[in-house]
């Protein structure tokens, strides 16, 4: 795992194959000119860079040959939503009222499906779904479905996520068929949470190269657990690992969510 930083490239591409794009094109042909794709709503701002990254991935995965063929996205970039981890740890107000308000706003504005550009916010997904009639895509369930196609039951998978997600056992709720390899408490606080929330972290606009080195150091600390893949279980971790390649795959739930958004919107 000690390759030079310049050699890293992301090698995990979950079913983003030629057959995937061919399927999307066939769906688009069936839609025809008189049937528009579904309007996509995104609850964003957690943080803003992650929201932009989800939009970028959706655009990249859309089989468009001209700009008019891209998906319409309604984005509520709402950074004032209280921090999810702070609430789970008992250190801040609940983000649920604003998450629900954002979902309602998107629904009333015409969104026909809704995505949440934040892993830890999925702690509240059932309550968010309750206030809208359109489907709210569950990124963690999509992650589970994808992993079950690639790994056998009990496979060890490294998980880098927020302390809120760890405290609430959010990923364990979905990934109970796998063995999750987690950082030590010290590494979690000194490296992972610093990358996400620190004064020089990604949410604070810190330099990506510095934060990438910290995440790679965290991954190196997991090697005794022999993980067969690394889950970027926080969108900021995903940003730090974008374009990175290791001897084991990097699994970014945001990639899987973007794929599902395109498939559902065109289907």
Image (tube, helix red, strand yellow):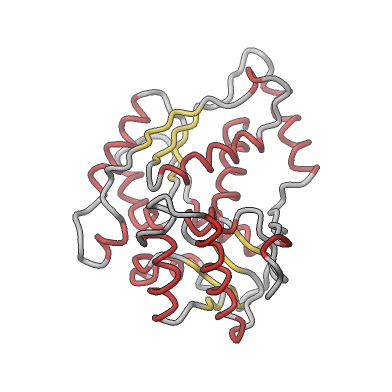
The quarter of the picture where residue 247 lies is: bottom right
Residue ranking furthest to the top: 34
Q: Considering only vertical position in the picture, is 29 above or below 254?
A: above
Between 247 and 97, the residue placed more toward the observer is 247
Residue ranking furthest to the bottom: 224
At 58% across and 38% down in the image, what residue appears? 56
Q: Say whether residue 6 is left or right of residue 261.
A: right
Q: Say whether residue 167 is left or right of residue 95.
A: right
Q: Say whether residue 86 is left or right of residue 221.
A: left
At 55% across and 55% down in the image, what residue appears? 253
The quarter of the picture where residue 83 lies is: bottom left
Residue 210: image location, x then y, percent: 52, 62
Quarter of the rendering occupied by the C terminus = top right
The quarter of the picture where residue 66 lies is: top right
Quarter of the rendering occupied by the N terminus = bottom right
Q: Say whether residue 77 is left or right of residue 90.
A: right
Between 181 and 191, the residue placed more toward the observer is 191
Q: Give the mark count.
A: 0
Between 236 and 111, the residue placed more toward the observer is 236
Residue 84: image location, x then y, percent: 31, 56
Between 236 and 16, the residue placed more toward the observer is 236
At 35% across and 58% down in the image, what residue appears? 123
At 67% across and 73% down in the image, what residue appears? 152
Residue 219: image location, x then y, percent: 57, 73
Q: Considering only vertical position in the picture, is 215 above or below 21?
A: below
Q: Considering only vertical position in the picture, is 172 above or below 39?
A: below
């Amino acid at each position: 795992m000690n390759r030079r930083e310049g050699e890293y490239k992301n090698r995990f591409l979950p079913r983003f194959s030629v057959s995937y794009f061919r399927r999307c094109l066939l769906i688009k042909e069936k839609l025809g000119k008189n049937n528009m794709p579904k309007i996509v709503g995104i609850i964003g701002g957690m943080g803003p860079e992650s929201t932009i990254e989800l939009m970028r991935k959706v655009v990249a995965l859309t089989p468009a040959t001209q700009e008019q063929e891209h998906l319409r996205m309604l984005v509520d970039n709402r950074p004032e939503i209280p921090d999810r981890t702070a609430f789970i740890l008992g250190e801040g107000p609940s983000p649920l009222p604003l998450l629900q308000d954002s979902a309602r706003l998107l629904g009333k504005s015409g969104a026909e499906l809704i995505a949440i550009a934040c892993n830890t916010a999925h702690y509240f997904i059932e309550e968010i779904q309750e206030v809208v009639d359109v489907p709210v895509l569950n990124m963690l369930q999509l992650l589970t479905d994808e992993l079950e196609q690639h790994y056998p039951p009990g496979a060890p998978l490294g998980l880098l996520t927020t302390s809120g997600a760890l405290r609430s056992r959010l990923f364990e709720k979905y990934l109970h068929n796998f063995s999750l390899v987690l950082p030590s408490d010290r590494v979690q606080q000194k490296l992972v949470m610093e990358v996400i929330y620190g004064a020089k972290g990604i949410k604070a606009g810190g330099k990506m190269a510095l934060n990438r080195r910290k995440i790679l150091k965290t991954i190196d600390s997991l090697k005794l657990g022999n993980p067969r893949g690394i889950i970027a279980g926080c969108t900021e971790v995903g940003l730090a690992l974008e374009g990175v390649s290791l001897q084991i795959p990097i699994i970014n739930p945001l990639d899987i969510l973007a794929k599902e958004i395109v498939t559902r919107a065109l289907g």
